[in-house]
Amino acid sequence: MSPAHISLFTLKSRGKRIGTDQLGNKYYEAAPIKGYKRNRRWVIYKAAPEASNVPPEWHGWLHHQSDVVPSEDGLSYRKAWQKPHKPNMTGTNQAYRPSGHILAGGKREKATGDYEPWVPPK
């Protein structure tokens, strides 16, 4: 969907803006559709629509795992030992490539000889 369609949907459904995350994504909620019990929740991305750009605390709210709205001040559910959000880099030049990966220019180490294949009983 284009941003214009998303904004039109937000206006038509009378979505109430709930909050904004540290990446600038805006989160909305509206009354449930007839026949459903839960409120509808959605996000309007600041940049390209990429699901990995939703921080974990907002992901939980979007999927009704929590009704507590994350704080706009910071990382309300994060612990000191947790790393900050990193986008999904699959398919880019920054994607993880372990040693031996063909695109990393490496070669896989030879087997050590400790592998014994399973042979079915006769």
Image (cartoon, helix red, strand yellow):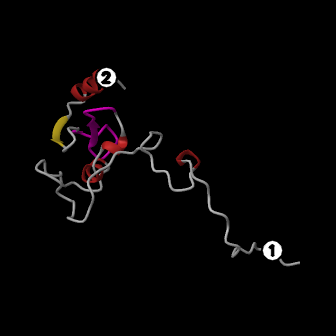
Residue carrying label 2: 5
Q: Is residue 49 left or right of residue 100?
A: left
Residue located at (56% from left, 48% from top): 105
Q: Which residues are magenta?
A: 26-48
- Element carrying mark 2: helix
Q: Quadrant of the N terminus?
A: top left
Instruction: Count neighbours of disc 1 (C-alpha within 10 A) and say few if under 14, some if 14 to 19, many if 20 or more.
Output: few
Q: Amino acid at mark 1?
A: Val
Extreme-left residue of the structure: 73
Residue located at (76% from left, 74% from top): 118
Camera-nearest residue between 51 and 63? 51
Camera-nearest residue between 102 and 23? 102
Q: CA distance from mark 1 to mark 2?
A: 59 Å
Earlier in the chain: of badge 1 and badge 2, it is: 2
Q: Amino acid at mark 2?
A: His
Image coordinates for residue 10, horizontal then vertical, percent: 24, 29
Image coordinates for residue 6, horizontal then vertical, percent: 29, 27
Tell us which disc is closer to us: 1 or 2. Answer: 1
Residue carrying label 1: 119
Question: Is 77 a magenta residue?
Answer: no
Q: Is residue 73 left or right of residue 49?
A: left
Compared to 70, does 109 lie above or below?
Answer: below
Residue located at (28% from left, 32% from top): 47
Q: Quadrant of the C terminus?
A: bottom right
Image coordinates for residue 108, horizontal then vertical, percent: 62, 58
Extreme-top residue of the structure: 4
Image coordinates for residue 91, horizontal then vertical, percent: 48, 40
Q: Quadrant of residue 17?
A: top left
Question: Is 29 a magenta residue?
Answer: yes
Residue located at (27% from left, 38% from top): 43
Label of residue 61 in the image: none
